[in-house]
Image (spheres, helix red, strand yellow):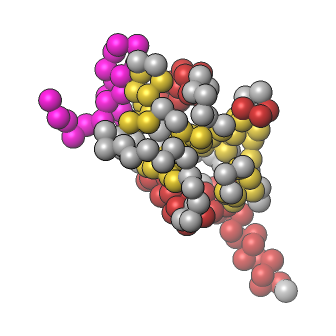
Amino acid sequence: MLSDIKHELIDGEVYVMSEAGSHHNRIVSNLSRDIGNQLKSATCEPFIADMKVQVKENYYYPDIIIDCNHEENDFGVTDTPVIIFEVLLRSTRKNDQVLKRQEYQQLNSLQYCVVIEQDVVDVEVCSRSNGWQSEHYFLDDEIHFEVGLTLDVVEICHRVKLEEVVKYHEEIALDIDST
């Protein structure tokens, strides 16, 4: 049976996915645009929202993945992502930060797992090369990935109406005006 509502299959149980708000959607849109532009001519390519990631018998819908597997896939499923991006929702925080991350890290292809807060500026990157230890990035930071991708935290948060983002842009405007 087909459904307009996304579901994830985890340990034999079907879970309805939560709907995302404007902060979440802006962050995903900003990431998608930036990643797509940077990887336009690369061998790796981004997929958003509708590409499922299979880990053993479980299926997840990350917000964005980057996959370097050139095999055509019309089933909307991959088990070869190199980078997975999850934007946290309050309702799915525990699942995304604990269960999914542990599952994703079992994929041999995965090099980075990126978890982005939507209510504060905090981008957490865990990489295989760093033993899956967390590194946090904030406004004014750039994040470099070995697939030829660099993300600027300010750009990830573009148009996201968080107090610290608004203050950051006000300070930049003041600095420009004073020069």
Residue 158 seen in the current view = no
Name the residue at 48% across, 24% down. 55
- The quarter of the displayed image where residue 10 is located: top left
**Which part of the image, by quadrant, shows the C terminus?**
bottom right
- The quarter of the displayed image where residue 37 is located: bottom right
Residue 39 seen in the current view = yes
Magenta extent: 1-19
Q: Position of residue 39 (x, y in %)?
A: 58, 61
The total number of labels drawn is 0
Name the residue at 61% across, 34% down. 110
Q: Is residue 5 magenta?
A: yes
Q: Is residue 73 magenta?
A: no
Name the residue at 46% across, 19% down. 56
In the figure, 169 relative to 137: above or below? below
Q: Position of residue 113 (x, y in %)?
A: 62, 36
Left or right for 124, reference 100: right
Which residue is most to the right?
A: 179
Name the residue at 70% across, 70% down. 170
In the figure, 29 relative to 62: above or below? below
Which residue is most to the front?
A: 71
